[in-house]
Amino acid sequence: MMKLQRWLSRNQLFEQIVCKKAGHVGHPLGSHPFSSRVGIPDSRQNFTRTVGENASDRVYAAYSVYKGKAGLSMMPCLPTFTKLESGCLVIGRRGSIMLTFFPAIGERKYDWTKKQLFALSPTEVGTLISLGPRDSCEFFHDPGMLSSSAGQVRKSLTIKAHADGNGYFISLNVVNNSENTKNFLSVPFTAGEFSVMKTACSFVLPHILGWDQLKKPSPGMGKVFQPNKVDREALSLEWER
């Protein structure tokens, strides 16, 4: 019975995180700074229910880590394709890996409404994958670049190795001059958690480049490659806020 209750709790937590429900999300393992939980539902049950009801629905499989002060969830956003008059398809909008940070507001509670987003480009994903146990890197984004709102919002993502080489701190700093706000969120990753992150990024890199589609037949591809509503909203928030 206890195992069943724990299993149900994990699936309810995943649905709250991935489906972007407003409110608080419970931290499954308390406030220990290096405790974590991966948001993965029972794939067989969810696949049966989803496909049985609507075959056009897609599968959500975010990798999430929850810590005492904040949590971090990552999910790929696939590229969109544009069909030319010749019938060929070209990248319309590049793919990325969306990182979503959300602050803790108490023991086992997170505020999803105050999330902050950072979309890793394929090149940034490559930098992350290449990091060694004592390496660090930093990425800067200006969502309003090349527009009249350039410089209004500045985002910097820092990945810094622990001094002992046994993990990393992944931190996001967001400065919004138009709203006069500053937000800083930092999530410690163990070596094992970061290894999962790197492996997942390595696996998904060809997909966000669109290279996994090169050998697929062209009929209907323009429709198949359209991102879901959640992907579009996430990209819009990342680049326009």
Image (spheres, grey):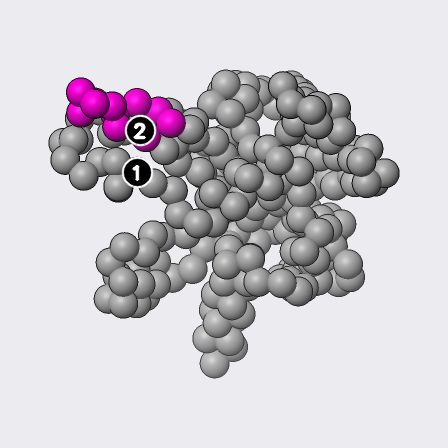
Secondary structure under tag 2 reads strand
Locate residue 38, reporting x and y percent: 52, 51
Please name the residue that numbered disc 1 is placed on: 225
**Which disc number belongs to residue 210?**
none
Q: Is residue 104 visible?
A: yes
Q: Residues within 10 Å of mark 2 (few under 14, many from 20)?
A: some
* Amino acid beneath label 2: Thr
Please name the residue that numbered disc 2 is placed on: 82
Indicate the quadrant containing the C terminus: top left, top right, bottom left or bottom right. Answer: top right
Q: Is residue 133 magenta?
A: no
Above or below, 48 relative to 240: below
Query: Residue drawn 74% across and 55% down?
Result: 104
Q: Is residue 90 magenta?
A: yes
Magenta region, residue range: 81-92
Query: Residue drawn 32% across and 30% down?
Result: 81
For discs 2 and 1, the disc positioned in front in the rendered view: 2
Q: Residues within 10 Å of mark 1 (few under 14, many from 20)?
A: some
Query: Residue drawn 45% across and 55% down?
Result: 40
Q: Is residue 158 visible?
A: no
Above or below, 164 relative to 230: above
Locate residue 9, reporting x and y percent: 53, 70
